[in-house]
Image (tube, rainbow, N blue to C red):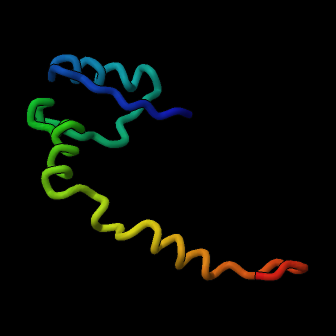
Amino acid sequence: MSQLVIEIDTPEDEALLMQLLPRLNGRLIEKRNTTQSQSKRDSLKDVLERIIQAGGAGKSFGDASEWQREIRSWDRVLDGREE
């Protein structure tokens, strides 16, 4: 068995597909209406621009070298080696 995701532009084409499904031993599992047009969707460029305008994502992570020092302090000394 396989599942397919199909995008159909017109209601007429959708009706035709629904008529064909029983003949192909297929069934509709889930129907999603995507009425949002491509122009209304946020493009990756728009999302990245908003992140940059907000000051970037780096501020929420803090100082990378401080994080590295903290993580390395958790390391244990290996057998046969001194600090």
The answer to which image quadrant residue 34 occupies is top left
Where's residue 40, x and y in %?
Answer: 9, 36
Count of numbered circles on the image? 0
The residue that appears at 47% across and 73% down in the rendered structure is 67
State left or right for residue 40 relative to residue 32.
Answer: left
State left or right for residue 30 relative to residue 70.
Answer: left
Quadrant (top left, top right, bottom left, bottom right) of the C terminus: bottom right
Query: Viewer-proximal residue, 82 or 4?
Result: 82
Quadrant (top left, top right, bottom left, bottom right) of the N terminus: top right
- Where is 75 relative to 47, above or below? below
| Residue lying furthest front | 83
The residue that appears at 15% across and 57% down in the rendered structure is 54
Where's residue 7, x and y in %?
Answer: 28, 26
Where's residue 3, x and y in %?
Answer: 46, 34
Query: Viewer-proximal residue, 66 or 48?
Result: 66
State left or right for residue 2 relative to residue 13.
Answer: right
- Where is 66 relative to 40, above or below? below
The residue that appears at 20% across and 52% down in the rendered structure is 51
| Residue lying furthest right | 80
The residue that appears at 22% across and 17% down in the rendered structure is 13
The answer to which image quadrant residue 47 occupies is top left
The answer to which image quadrant residue 77 occupies is bottom right
State left or right for residue 77 relative to residue 30.
Answer: right
Where's residue 6, x and y in %?
Answer: 33, 27
